[in-house]
Image: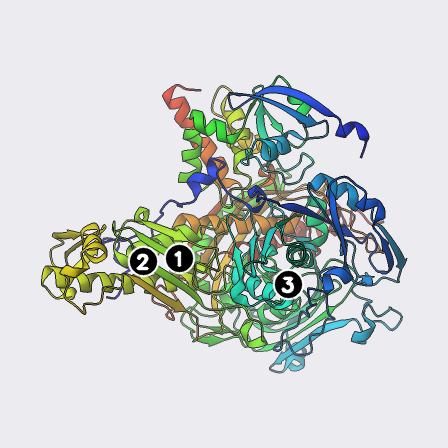
């Protein structure tokens, strides 16, 4: 049966409606079960001794004082862990030329960033382990450190990893069209230099893992705050020398992830290694300083960009030179080159133009490694693209909305391929921009801005169009040799009472994955969402799959769930047809009962069918299939990625005396294809926007020239709090992907992709009459005053 | 560590309406006492220096930071956590509003957020959205962007006023 999503009066119409999250009820009662809430018999705690130097040789480790602390059981060095755990290399074959040296779970003879683990202390209490960790005496010989991105490749700069030859981790240049001719013939060429601040995810729940090794069974169990349980299973098995089938990763409640918890961290693998050595449960919970120094960082980019435009506003060319510094190692197994690569892929993305050159240069430095964090590369590409487009509009005296309508891919242009060779199946830039302009009442807002100006109040409006990469196929990681699944699966089962259990390989970290799955399964089978119980986050009891990252849960995991649910419906109706002596296609399942397809008349509750199948199968015809368990998998194949699009707007007030920026309001119209749960999608967009607003105004990790992190606490690293955040107006255009029956694309990163660029453009709209401009994030009062020329020292 | 933090101190207090007697190290934080010694894992330790609000619990009627108060300081106090406030039903309308409005995603901040919000709701009148945002300015949420939380608290305040509760 084909789903008729367009008909809101169809039976079991849960897809497209706001349905409560099944797991929210226990979370509001404090009944969540996060890793740190789990206590196991014989459990011990590990605390890591971390390098205080950005770069130092480890000459020796004396643990005698630490071992004397009451409660301390063992102290492990890098060499101890290396006896059971092999090092890894964070490269992927399709990122040609990417290099990174072997990385150990605990540094063996050299530490390469402040915070790298150099020893591990295990004790019966965390308190004892922390006390003893301070007493481990490590004899360091400091080495010259590399901390400046733009001089990392200079001859005078030391080579961080001598075996690598130089400090260049990766570079890629993409050229399309005749860039030089385009710039030579342009009416106007605008050039600007942008910076995005190095920041991090600041998950409220720190990274957490509890690992037990049972030597009697040769079996490891890891309770892990992760987004990708099967990927972690693979990595632990490979590097600790166990068959994958002997490693079980359980991912219960996770207190925020945003990409931070999709990577392999040395201290987490070391925890598993220690559990294997000690044959007992070992818990590691990062503290807040460890979170700042060892969670992956992101967005540390400097970009020189140029745009060429014709007199009528046509965009002729973009020329992008992106630099990023990724820390001391490329992060395993997704690497640290994806972000720069995405900048090359995504700059100019919304626009139909011909000539494009983009280069990313990815260098090593002695800082915390960077890797994928929510909206990987997008905020950088959108900031550069939309910043340049607004500057061009100003130079041409064009309205920011008009220049976008002049250049955005036409809504009937699809399928289309961008100059960066990104393939678009179907986008809705113009419809989205038109909707945004209506939603914000653009003309009235301009009038308000003018009225404010007359009162001496400085306000600005900023717009940012964007594309977002979602539903990644094996072209993202699998092609590069990583054992990271692009496929997801769902097993749907009917139990004797007619209730449904669905086990899915996509995971929940608060997005509402389980609600989304319950709606899809409910509609696919024909029951109430409350009759569906969802199981996620366990490699032993769910189908194999990728997990939740790159905005893939609904689009990929959801389609697998829909197909499994439909298969179960068919299996149920085959039994029902035999029991009711009628063709299965004359029957339907609605609200948990078998009914006539024609008039909806009740024929039999599912509980009766369940009773017969499970307890009185003897009464059914011999040979009648009665498989009330169905599994389906899904992996995108037609397109490497399902691109989505959207546009955001920001209205700000700038105090030109203090440089303070006040966010007045924010809007976003986005197109994630089929919306499964409107409320959950809106809240993903809002949460994502606020992470982008943090990047725009507050968040930046500061290092000194010696590679010391200067603001590793929540008192010093500012995050968005309730008082500073605006209300956000969200709306959608729906262009379902034709690749799946469900038609859903991802929505989790759209908010973050465009928010900071919209704020930047709004601030610059406000500053332009004063001849001011800002392009280096975050836009602190100091930077705004510098942009205005009021601070010059 | 200063030796005095290891000294053991006898405390007697009420937690969620039940009498508790314990012998704790002087350096034991209240949130660790609740989580590790009493198994009340609703309040969470996160920033551990009083900034994020995940450990917020109610002590003698006030919302306080469990990571900034020692268990020893709670001797004789009346302590309530989200578990106890759920059992009594004191939070049930606010909790229902959080679920209905999806004012939580990962749920890690939520217990602290609820206790902080309850303190505001106990004051007379319907707080403005600005007042709600200001009151929550010490409770960090990375998932929601706060708007849904403000909505849920606002609608609860309105509903309580309509019922004549507040």
Spot occupied by residue B56 in the image (x, y as percentages of width and height): 59, 31
The residue tagged with tag 1: helix, strand or loop?
strand
Q: Please determine whether, in this image, residue A31 is positioned above or below residue A754.
A: above
Which one is in front in this view, the residue at disc 3 or the one at disc 1? Answer: 1
> Label 2, label 1: how many angstroms apart (C-alpha)?
9 Å
Residue at which label 2 appears: A493
Which one is in front in this view, the residue at disc 2 or the one at disc 3? Answer: 2
User: Residue visible at 64% across and 19% down?
Assistant: B75
Residue at which label 1 appears: A503
> Is residue A676 visible to us here?
no
The one of B142 and A693 positioned closer to us in this rendering: B142
The one of A156 and B34 positioned closer to us in this rendering: B34
Asked if labels 1 and 2 touch by Cβ distance under 8 angstroms, the answer is yes
Q: Chain of mark 1?
A: A
Between disc 2 and disc 1, whose residue precedes?
2
Extreme residue toward the left, this view? A581
Q: Chain of mark 2?
A: A
Tell me, for residue A384, which label it has, or none. Answer: 3
Spot occupied by residue A156 in the image (x, y as percentages of width and height): 89, 70
Q: Chain of mark 3?
A: A
Looking at the rendered structure, whether the residues under marks 3 and 1 are on a common chain is answered as yes
Spot occupied by residue A87 in the image (x, y as percentages of width and height): 70, 67
Between disc 3 and disc 1, whose residue precedes?
3
User: Residue visible at 54% across and 73% down?
Assistant: A478
Left or right: A625 as drawn, with respect to A404: left
The residue tagged with tag 2: helix, strand or loop?
strand
The one of A16 and A195 positioned closer to us in this rendering: A16
Circle 3 residues within 10 Å: few <14, some 14–19, many ≥20: many
Which quadrant of the view contains residue A181? bottom right
The residue tagged with tag 3: helix, strand or loop?
helix
């Amino acid at each position: 049966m084909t789903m008729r999503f367009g008909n809101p009066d169809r039976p079991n119409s849960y897809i497209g409606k706001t349905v409560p999250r099944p797991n929210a009820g226990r979370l509001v009662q404090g009944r969540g079960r996060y890793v740190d809430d789990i206590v196991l018999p014989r459990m011990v705690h590990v605390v890591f001794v971390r390098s205080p130097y950005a770069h130092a040789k480890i000459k020796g480790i004396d643990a005698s004082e630490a071992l004397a602390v009451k409660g301390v059981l063992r102290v492990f060095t890098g060499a101890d862990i290396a006896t059971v755990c092999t090092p890894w290399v964070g490269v992927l074959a399709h990122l040609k030329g990417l290099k990174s040296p072997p990385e150990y779970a605990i540094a063996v003879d050299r530490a390469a960033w402040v915070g790298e683990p150099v020893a591990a202390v295990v004790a019966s209490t965390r308190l004892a382990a922390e006390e003893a960790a301070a007493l481990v005496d490590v004899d360091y010989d400091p080495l010259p450190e590399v901390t400046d991105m733009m001089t990392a490749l200079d001859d005078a700069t030391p080579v961080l990893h001598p075996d690598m030859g130089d400090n260049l981790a990766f570079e890629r240049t993409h050229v399309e069209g005749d860039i030089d001719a385009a710039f030579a013939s342009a009416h106007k060429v605008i050039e600007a230099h942008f910076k995005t601040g190095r920041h991090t995810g600041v998950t409220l729940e720190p990274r957490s893992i509890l690992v037990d090794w049972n030597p009697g069974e040769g079996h490891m169990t890891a309770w892990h705050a992760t987004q990708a349980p099967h990927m972690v299973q693979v990595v632990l098995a490979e590097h600790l020398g166990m068959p994958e089938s002997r490693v079980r990763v359980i991912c219960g409640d996770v207190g925020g992830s945003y990409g931070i918890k999709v990577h392999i961290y040395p201290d987490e693998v070391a925890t598993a290694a220690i559990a294997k050595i000690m044959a007992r449960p070992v818990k590691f919970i990062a503290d807040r300083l460890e979170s700042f120094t060892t969670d992956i960082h992101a967005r540390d980019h400097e970009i020189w960009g140029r745009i060429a435009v014709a007199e009528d506003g046509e965009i002729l060319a973009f020329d992008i030179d992106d630099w990023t510094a990724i820390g001391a190692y490329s992060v395993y197994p997704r690497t640290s080159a994806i972000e720069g690569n995405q900048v090359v892929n995504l700059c100019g993305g919304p626009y139909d133009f011909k000539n494009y050159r983009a280069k990313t240069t990815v260098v090593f430095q002695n800082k915390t490694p960077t890797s994928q964090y929510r909206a990987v590369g997008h905020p950088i590409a959108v900031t550069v693209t939309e910043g340049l487009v607004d500057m061009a509009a100003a130079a041409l005296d064009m309205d920011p909305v008009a220049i976008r309508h002049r250049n955005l891919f036409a809504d009937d242009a699809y399928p289309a391929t961008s100059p960066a060779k990104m393939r678009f199946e179907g986008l809705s830039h113009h419809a989205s921009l038109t909707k945004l302009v209506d939603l914000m009442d653009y003309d009235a807002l301009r009038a308000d801005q003018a009225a404010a100006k007359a009162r001496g109040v400085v306000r600005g409006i900023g717009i940012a169009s964007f594309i977002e990469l979602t539903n990644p196929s094996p072209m993202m990681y699998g092609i590069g040799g990583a054992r990271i699944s692009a496929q997801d699966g769902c097993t749907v089962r009917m139990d004797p009472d007619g209730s449904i259990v669905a086990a899915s390989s996509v995971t929940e970290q608060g997005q509402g994955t389980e609600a989304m799955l319950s709606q899809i399964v409910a509609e696919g089978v024909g029951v109430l969402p409350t009759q569906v119980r969802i199981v996620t986050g366990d490699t032993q009891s769910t189908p194999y799959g990728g997990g939740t990252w790159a905005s893939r849960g609904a689009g990929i995991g959801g389609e697998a769930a829909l197909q499994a649910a439909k298969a179960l419906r068919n299996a149920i109706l085959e039994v029902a047809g035999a029991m009711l002596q009628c063709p299965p296609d004359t029957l339907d399942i609605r609200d948990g009962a078998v009914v006539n397809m024609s008039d909806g008349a009740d024929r039999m509750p599912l509980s009766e069918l369940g009773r017969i199948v499970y307890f009185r199968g003897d009464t059914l015809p011999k040979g009648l299939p009665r498989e009330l368990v169905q599994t389906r998998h899904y992996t995108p194949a037609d397109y490497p990625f399902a691109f989505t699009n959207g546009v955001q707007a920001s209205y700000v007030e700038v105090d030109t005396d203090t440089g303070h920026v006040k966010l007045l309001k924010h809007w976003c119209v986005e197109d994630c294809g089929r919306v499964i749960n409107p409320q959950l999608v809106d809240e993903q967009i809002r949460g994502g926007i606020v992470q982008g607003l943090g990047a725009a105004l507050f968040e930046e990790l500061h290092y000194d020239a010696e590679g010391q992190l200067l603001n590793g606490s929540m008192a010093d690293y500012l995050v968005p709090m309730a008082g500073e955040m605006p209300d956000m107006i969200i709306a959608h255009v729906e262009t379902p992907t034709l690749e799946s029956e469900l038609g859903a694309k991802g929505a989790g990163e759209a908010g973050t992709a465009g928010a900071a660029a919209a704020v930047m453009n709004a601030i610059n709209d406000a500053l332009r009459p004063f001849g001011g401009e800002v392009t280096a994030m975050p836009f602190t009062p100091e930077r705004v005053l510098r942009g205005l020329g009021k601070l010059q020292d | 560590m200063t030796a005095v933090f290891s000294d053991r101190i006898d405390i007697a207090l009420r937690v969620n309406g039940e009498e508790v007697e314990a012998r704790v190290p002087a350096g034991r934080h209240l949130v660790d006492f609740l989580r590790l010694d009493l198994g009340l894992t609703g309040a969470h330790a996160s920033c551990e220096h009083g900034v994020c609000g995940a450990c917020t619990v109610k002590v003698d009627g006030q919302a306080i930071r469990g990571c900034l108060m020692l268990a020893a300081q709670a001797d004789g106090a009346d302590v309530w956590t989200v578990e106890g406030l759920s059992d009594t039903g004191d939070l049930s309308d606010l909790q229902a509003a959080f679920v209905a409005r999806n004012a939580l995603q990962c749920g890690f901040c939520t217990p602290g957020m609820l206790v902080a919000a309850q303190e505001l709701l106990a004051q007379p009148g319907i707080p403005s959205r600005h007042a709600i945002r200001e009151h929550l300015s010490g409770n960090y949420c990375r998932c929601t962007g706060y708007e849904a939380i403000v909505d849920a608290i606002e609608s609860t305040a309105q509903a309580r006023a309509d019922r004549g509760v507040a």
